[in-house]
């Protein structure tokens, strides 16, 4: 079968490497892909948000199946457009992708159906938002309603910072129209957990849990990024907590979406906070998380393509989804200066004898050389029987993958190791 994966990051490279293992797939395309994916799939220079061109390519090349991985094309309706011309897809339709596309929608959904989340208010008037902050509990969290490349969330430690965040979103349009509506919500405390789940709209099969490291610098200092590394499984996420989440969050969310006429099929990402009052939802994503995917899929023992098709065809309940009992660690190597100003164009050296997988996010091919072209350049993932072994192995291999101007955090997984003792 001929399969295309929409997207160009480390998440998509991980998905492609997993799909390559399927004996049913004879040809893999990446649209647009990146220089590091070229060894695993044929890259086609069509942007992930170019619905018309993607549909045309699928028709002209008789694509049998499509995986729509990033948030933007899902929210724009890529799955609807491909299904309209007979191409089955992994990923939610537009009316279900709104669960990530609008934080106002998702918060209101949780309130309506009693799904545990932080207390909140929504605003489309700046004066009202600023007045509310005069009496709101501090710290507080200010969120842009729409997609903002993972950066539309500000934790405000003071009332002044909270008001500045509101003005940057609503008046200065820091995130464009995504900030026209905002959510101001209660600041929750507790360990964070990411849980990705396969769902066909009735059955939910969670993947192994993970822990992301968002801050740019060691000891969770520096600016928020798209993710500097991940480990799996998350030691805070016990079987007892998993059972509570299934009963109070996972199944109720799927049932709520069905009740709203927005059946969700694909990968639903649950960003959770394990508060003293139980697990609560911080956010939903309508797709695989990045870089969580880089530790979750390497632990998947089942055939990913088989699972994805079962999701599309509503057969997930009868399909095995099995994960290794081991652990995984992903170290993200980024361009110095990220997430602000950084230089690119440096040659990347990846030894052939690595005892780890390399998932490329920001790189291009030029004259046969792989050059850095983004902030987060690549992730190096190692698996091992224990988390300590996975972390040690990931760093040993990451240090052998080199490019000028590179940096990475040196403490990925240390918080998880401390929790597991």
Image: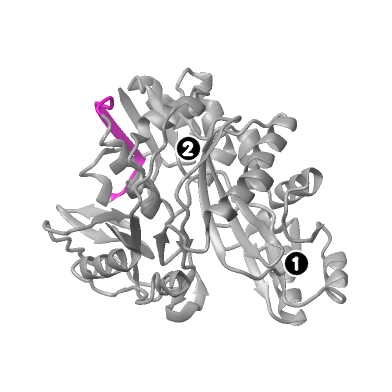
Residue located 74% across and 69% down the image = 166
Q: Quarter holding the N terminus?
A: top left
Residue located 29% across and 63% down the image = 390
Residue 271 position, x and y percent, is: 58, 55
Residue 9 in view (yes/no): no
Q: Quarter holding the C terminus?
A: bottom left
Residue located 47% across and 25% down the image = 318
For the residue pair 232 and 396, the one nearer the viewer reads as: 232
Left or right: where does residue 364 sit relative to residue 277?
Answer: left
Residue 186, numbered label: 1
Q: Secondary structure at mark 1?
A: strand
Residue 321, numbered label: none
Q: Which residues are magenta?
A: 23-34
Distance Cα–Cα, label 1 vs label 2: 37 Å
For the residue pair 109 and 89, the one nearer the viewer reads as: 109
Write down the quadrant of residue 272 in the picture. Answer: bottom right
Magenta segment includes 47? no
Residue 303 position, x and y percent, is: 33, 34
Q: Secondary structure at mark 2?
A: loop
Graded by Cα atoms within 10 Å as few (under 14), some (14 to 19) or many (20 or more), the crowding at tag 1 reads some
Residue at numbered disc 2: 50
């Amino acid at each position: 079968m001929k399969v295309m994966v929409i997207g160009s990051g480390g998440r998509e490279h991980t998905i492609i490497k997993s799909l390559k293992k399927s004996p049913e797939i004879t040809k893999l395309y990446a649209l647009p892909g990146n220089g590091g994916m070229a060894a695993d799939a044929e890259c086609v220079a069509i942007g992930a948000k170019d619905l018309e061109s993607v549909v045309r390519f699928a028709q002209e090349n008789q694509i049998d199946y499509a995986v729509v991985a990033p948030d933007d094309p899902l929210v724009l309706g890529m799955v609807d457009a491909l299904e309209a011309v007979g191409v089955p897809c992994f990923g939610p339709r537009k009316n279900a992708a709104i669960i990530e596309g609008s934080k106002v929608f998702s918060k209101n959904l949780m309130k309506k159906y009693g799904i545990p989340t932080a207390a909140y208010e929504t605003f489309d008037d700046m004066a009202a938002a600023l007045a509310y902050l005069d009496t709101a509990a501090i710290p507080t969290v200010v969120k842009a309603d729409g997609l903002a490349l993972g950066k539309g969330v500000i934790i405000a430690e003071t009332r002044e910072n909270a008001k500045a965040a509101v003005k940057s979103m609503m008046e200065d349009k820091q995130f464009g129209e995504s900030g026209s509506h905002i959510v101001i919500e209660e600041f929750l405390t507790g360990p964070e957990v990411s849980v990705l789940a396969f769902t066909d709209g009735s059955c939910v099969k969670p993947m192994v849990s993970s822990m992301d490291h968002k801050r740019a610098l060691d000891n969770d200092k520096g600016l928020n990024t798209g993710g500097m590394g991940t480990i799996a499984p998350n030691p805070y996420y016990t079987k007892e907590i998993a059972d509570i989440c299934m009963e109070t969050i996972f199944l109720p969310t799927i049932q709520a979406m069905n009740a709203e006429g927005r059946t969700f099929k694909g990968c639903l990402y649950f960003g959770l906070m394990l508060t003293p009052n139980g697990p609560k939802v911080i956010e939903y994503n309508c797709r695989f998380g990045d870089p969580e995917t880089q530790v979750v899929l390497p632990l998947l023992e089942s055939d990913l393509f088989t699972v994805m098709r079962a999701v599309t065809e509503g057969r997930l309940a009868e399909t095995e989804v099995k994960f290794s009992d081991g652990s995984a660690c992903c170290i993200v190597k980024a361009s110095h200066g990220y997430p602000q100003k950084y230089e690119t164009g440096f040659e990347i050296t990846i030894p052939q004898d690595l005892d780890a997988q390399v998932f490329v996010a920001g790189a291009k091919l030029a004259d046969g050389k792989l050059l850095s072209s983004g902030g987060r350049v690549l992730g190096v993932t190692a698996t091992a029987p224990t988390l300590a072994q996975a972390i040690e192995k990931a760093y040993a291999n990451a240090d052998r993958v080199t490019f000028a101007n590179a940096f990475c955090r040196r403490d990925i997984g240390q918080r998880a190791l401390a929790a597991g003792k």
